[in-house]
Amino acid sequence: MKAPRKVSLTVNGEALSGEASPRMLFADFLRDVLGKTGTHVGCEHGVCGACTVIVDDVAVRSCLMFAVQAEGADVKTVEGLADGEELHPLQKLFSEHRALQCGYCTPGMLMTAIDLVASNNALSEQDIKVGMSAALCRCTGYDGIVKAVTAYAEQVHGKPIKRESDNG
Amino acid sequence: MADTMPSYIGRSVVRREDNRLLKGAGTFVGDMKLEGMVHVAIVRSQQAHARINSVDLEAARNADGVVLALAGAELKDVLPPISGMQVAAPKGWRDGMDPHIDIPDQTLVPYDKLRYVGEPYALVVAGDRYMAEDAAELIEGDFDPLPPIASAEAALDAEALVHDHLPGNIAATLHAKKGEGEAALEAAPHRLKRRYYHHRYAAMPMECRGVVAEYDSRTDSITVWSSTQVVHWVRREVANALDMPEERVRVVAPDVGGGFGGKGHVYPEDILIAYLAKRLDRPVKWLEDRHEHLLNAAHSRDNLFDIEVGYDDDGRISVVKNYFLVDSGAYSPVGAAIAGNSIAHFMGPYDIPHYEADCKVMMTNRTPNAPYRGAGRPEVAFAMERSIDLIANELGLDPAEVRFRNMIQPEQMPYAVGLPYRDGVMIEYDSGDYPEALRKALDGIGGLDEFRSRQKAALAEGRYLGLGLGCYVEGTGIGPFEGATVKIDSSGKVMVATGACPQGQGHETAFAQVAADIWNVPIEDVVVTLADTSHVTMGYGTIASRSAVTASGAIKDSSDKVKEKVFAIAANVLEASESDLELRNGSVGVKGVPEMSMTLKEVARAALPGWIHQRPEGIEAGLEGTAYYEPPTVTWAYAANAAIVEIDAQTGVVKIENYVEVHDAGTLINPGIADGQVRGGLVQGIGGGLFEELFYDEHGQLMTGSFMDYLLPTASDIPPINVIHTETPSPRNSFGFKGLGEGGAIAPPVVIANAVCDALKSFGAELNSTPVRAEQILNIIDAGVAAAE
């Protein structure tokens, strides 16, 4: 084991730093060192997506990244979405469309969706389903999640997205 | 009750839970950090069956940051096992099920032998989880391998025994009979005999299990935070193991990231972590990782059925004989309860005069099997609903028609099944219209005749469309009881605490709705406390689709006690007759006289003990009541499912075009939440039907021990799902509620299997096991093509 190193980064606009041994996972660093426990850990092998955060504008699984790799990074986590008491538009849509039940996958879902919508301005509903397949939810059956993200993409890009249900 | 307030029951009120969870501000066990907290890593067996000779802890004890390292031998005389016989079997059930049950106790950390891959045999406590895992790797065990018993069928004839005192590896047998039973088969014009296998899969909540415990030496008390569905049950077992009064053990389930039954019983770690916190006098934390969860959190299903059905030329079923084996793994945390469910639910919504069931609960070297969403019902729904489709094929009838011909008609309600339920009461379906549910489901997929024409046309083009049906009934809201305490203090707020332990069901919201209606107060004035033993003396927990019925009943009964006082005190203060009073929008007032009223806050102050109280004689101080609701028996939810699939003949992939479930759970508290529950269950059922499998090899090794191998459904796997809710109130409680947490998960595996067989009927397809795999479909097509050539 090597000696801990100081990791300095920006989290939700705030300059923070903490000590991390070279092998410490970024998810553990966020949660245990910086106290940002909104980011959850569901599988620790990069499948479930619960630990998804945005690092330098890209969604990453924080369980597959070392804390030391975040040196100097600009990180966004679920704690940075709401503006005080005012929920982020996507958070509001999640509640409205019943896109959460136990709430454990929710932070990773939100960060996955924000990255998906920000990085593609011509999403179809099918693209959203495929994109959101990067994160697992065991409660909802995904219907509300897909609806919430679709509505969010419409808000962000200012144009309607064709739903499968429109066909019938 | 005056009609001054809107009713909350029946409205999709926005969930109270959402705000904190959306902000990442919930508190799950893993989020807890206490001063001086140490961390546990558990060392688990890599062998399915082995004798423990010794465990060498020396290197681990000398490793960096290690506080303690223990193996089973050190705990053997300190901590008792979890009793295998902790779920009560009432007399009526024993009378009807002829049970012979000897469920083995579960040693928390075995010292003599290991019985499944994943079973703990040592543990390390260290300054952080990284150090604990490093040290855990240094622990070496000396084991002698024993012959693994890798399946229930193998267990029957095996020489090796999972538990030395259980010959034949049988932990329980049950036998039940209705009518003439098997003897009626002789008289049946036709018989169908089949073997069905419902495979092993599991709850798989996104949050794995976890426990934090903190001991307070000043008061000799302990607090345990566990990701559990049953805080009172955990309290009982911790108190028993540590020989402490229950009053000195507080168990809290904070935010829980899904449960679905998998967190519905006491696990060794619940007790171990509490023990370690007391022994070390430091807060202790253990978090299960996903690999551990797959190996060690309870699995479910895994039943093998040999079925014989007698029926006539019209497809009317006269008798079912059901012989089945449950692969319970190495232990059976909830005893024979799942098997009892299976026996009781087999006949579903059908009017079958004769039935006989025999079951053996088998011990094997697999992970323990415990209830998971459906708990014995998906298994029998598979056997029954496949049998109906096969009978339809034999007779050249449509499977829908055979179902209609056998269904219990609405005028037969209440319908006596002739078997006891797990609560000891003879089963009587309480209400519902089963044929109507099936008609609605068929309408939901666009009509049966329309589909058959479309199917025919598609087949002519070489496309394989199939219709799968599946119907079930589900006993919900089971006892024995649930507790609730209701208080109104001088703030005037209505405070409700119940033993319910939600894991995402939105109980804080739903029970606030119930209490707001009971008290006729704005919902904002209801404060709900859940899953904390310090708030309710006795409770049962959230398993078995029970909380809507049982916790609501307890909230009502405890509220009724408090209301008596509220009315007596208000009558005294307002100088009115109690019978002239009503609850209205947070106040008690005289009917028809709006200006004569007092707020609940004023009543609460008038109820205070002391010099200036305004209680009439004989009324005790304080507005507080506790009640334990003991339901008369279960309420019967039901559903009909219909799905259309298309098979890709090149790849064997099943595409579900449309899935409809017509679901009836009586009066719905919050239709939005209810819809989410049913929908979520359906998707778990689709996962079990197509993707998820806890697959063991012949050595008892789990081959699907990660999310790379155990495949959960993702957003892109989900077909269009239409859930149609009908509401036939249950006559068994004053609200008309039935339970609905599990229902959705019951039917999809058999609906998918039926649909695939229907699509590939021209190939003589017959799928009698789950999950439905692409390679099976390709084999069916290849064999069918070869036969035709």
Image (cartoon, coloured by chain):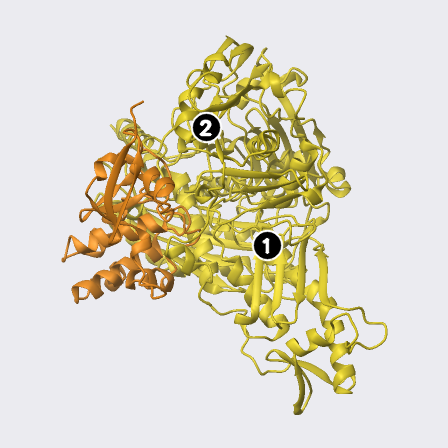
Chain colours: A orange, B yellow
Mark toward the start of the polypeptide (1 vs 2): 2
* Residue sitting at x 52%, y 52%: B741
- The answer to whether residue B652 shows anywhere in this view is yes
Q: CA distance from mark 1 to mark 2?
A: 29 Å
Q: Answer above or below: position of B99 versus B735.
A: above
Residue A126 drawn at (x, y percent): 22, 52
Asked where in the image residue B323 lies, by quadrant, the reply is: top right
Q: Chain of mark 1?
A: B
* Residue sitting at x 62%, y 30%: B359
* Residue sitting at x 67%, y 26%: B80
Q: Name the residue nearer the viewer: A50 or B140.
A: B140
Q: Name the residue nearer the viewer: A81 or A121.
A: A81
Label 1 sits on residue: B547
* Residue sitting at x 63%, y 71%: B518
Residue B130 drawn at (x, y percent): 39, 28
Residue B715 drawn at (x, y percent): 30, 48
Q: Name the residue nearer the viewer: B706 or B408.
A: B706
Q: Residues within 10 Å of mark 1 (few under 14, many from 20)?
A: many
User: Where is the C terminus of chain B found, in terms of image quarters?
Assistant: top left
Label 2 sits on residue: B295
Q: Residues within 10 Å of mark 2 (few under 14, many from 20)?
A: many
Q: Amino acid at mark 2?
A: Leu
- The answer to whether residue B47 shows anywhere in this view is no
Q: Chain of mark 2?
A: B
Asked where in the image residue A151 lies, by quadrant, the reply is: bottom left
Residue B238 drawn at (x, y percent): 65, 36
Q: Amino acid at mark 1?
A: Ser
User: Where is the N terminus of chain B found, in terms of image quarters?
Assistant: bottom right
